[in-house]
Image (spheres, rainbow, N blue to C red):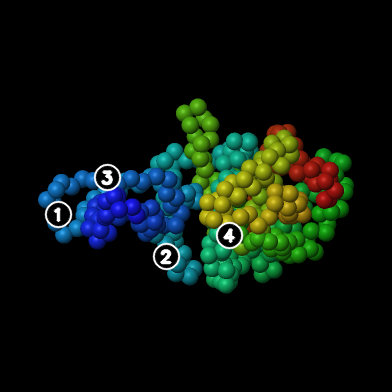
Amino acid sequence: MADDEPKVDAAMTPSPPVTPGSLVTEDHVRAALTSDKGTAAQLTDWKVVDFTKKGDNYACLVTSVEVKYELDEINVPKCFHASLEEGKEVIFLEDLRARGYKMADRKQGLDKAHTTLVLRELARLHAASLLLQNRTPGEHLGEKYHLLKIGLAYFFQNYDAMLNIIKDSVSFSQTLLKTVGGYERVNSWMDTILANVVDIFEMLNCGEPKVVCHGDCWNNNLLFRYSETGHPEDVMLLDLQLANYSAPAADLNYLLYTSMSGDVRKPNIEAFLGFYYTTFKDVMEAGGKTVPFTQQQLLKDFREKNVTGTIFAILSAPVMFLDAEDTVDSSKECTEDLVETFREAREKSWEILDKDPHLKSRYLSVFDEMMELGIV
């Protein structure tokens, strides 16, 4: 240092004043937000807003922080209470009617706008479960939550009623196809279903990654909220009692082959799966992870599991065709009388199919696709 330059004693240099802005960091804000709203909350903006005057406090600095955040929650109704006494299980859920949610017309089927909303929620559910699994890699979700291990294959292995439902549903479909004509190849294929039904549904557990699947994602288990012009704006997933740990393609096949007509599904399959993939990717990246499969791999896995999509369509068809006033007694569900419930539905659906060519063509479109793809 030159002699003519002033010398500064470091010990005499005043320290910068301590202010709320110098004490509060973004890490502090994120930690507080996570403690309050959970790890799903994403911080988007924050600022310190002083509200005290000099002399209000002498022992410490008092201030406030205004926070803006996004909270991505899976769209399911709030649970207010649950009693899990075996054989007397009860669950109290939010009444979504008060928020304007209602069921779409299952006979009409979902259009592109409705389907896109459902695919968004499935992607968020699937990706969120994968992020949860990634947080505890040594603890498999399917082992931690044993009910997730119970997929449809379990029911076919352990309950004769389920096999009888498939048997009767296949018989219904074969009779219908014989009446229409031109589906001999499909009828021959259906003869093989019963002998291989467990193996067919075990296919849903093949491949990686495994995610928490809804397990019963079709029209009746979805509620939509609409704009004043009638456009669907949001969807809620209901009835997750069949949730299980399977490949994403399980839910995708279930939804796309039970809940819409062929003229919506067939030309939009790749677009639908592309939208699902993009949403899945966005959720994973927001959680600091990458998608462990490509869009092409997703399409391949979806096609490999199309057989299950066809069986889902066969099982749901009789109920799908019924009007509300024709619906059979649902109090028999989850009992051995479920077989009779489906039988009643099939008997009532015959008359409806004869009167409504739209429903018949919607059902036949599933088999038309499978023959074109060489799956049947």
Seen in the picture, residue 142 relative to 166 is either above or below; the reply is below
Secondary structure found at label 3: strand
- The answer to which quarter of the image holds residue 267 is top right
> For the point 68% across and 55% down, which residue is it?
293
| Closer to the camera in the image, 107 or 294 | 294
Secondary structure found at label 2: strand
Secondary structure found at label 1: loop
Three-letter code, disc 4? Leu
- Mark 4 = which residue? 130
Tell me if label 2 and label 1 are in contact, CB under 8 Å: no
> For the point 76% across and 52% down, which residue is it?
300
- Mark 2 = which residue? 83
Q: Residue furthest top?
A: 229
Q: Left or right: where does residue 31 sit relative to residue 193?
A: left
Whether residue 10 appears in this view of the structure is: yes
- Mark 3 = which residue? 49
Q: Residue furthest front?
A: 3
Mark 4 or mark 2, earlier in chain:
2
Whole-angstrom CA distance, mark 3 to mark 1, is: 16 Å
Mark 2 or mark 3, earlier in chain:
3
Q: Nearer the viewer, mark 1 or mark 4?
A: 1
Q: Nearer the viewer, mark 2 or mark 1?
A: 1
Whole-angstrom CA distance, mark 3 to mark 4, is: 38 Å
Whether residue 362 appears in this view of the structure is: no
- Mark 1 = which residue? 57
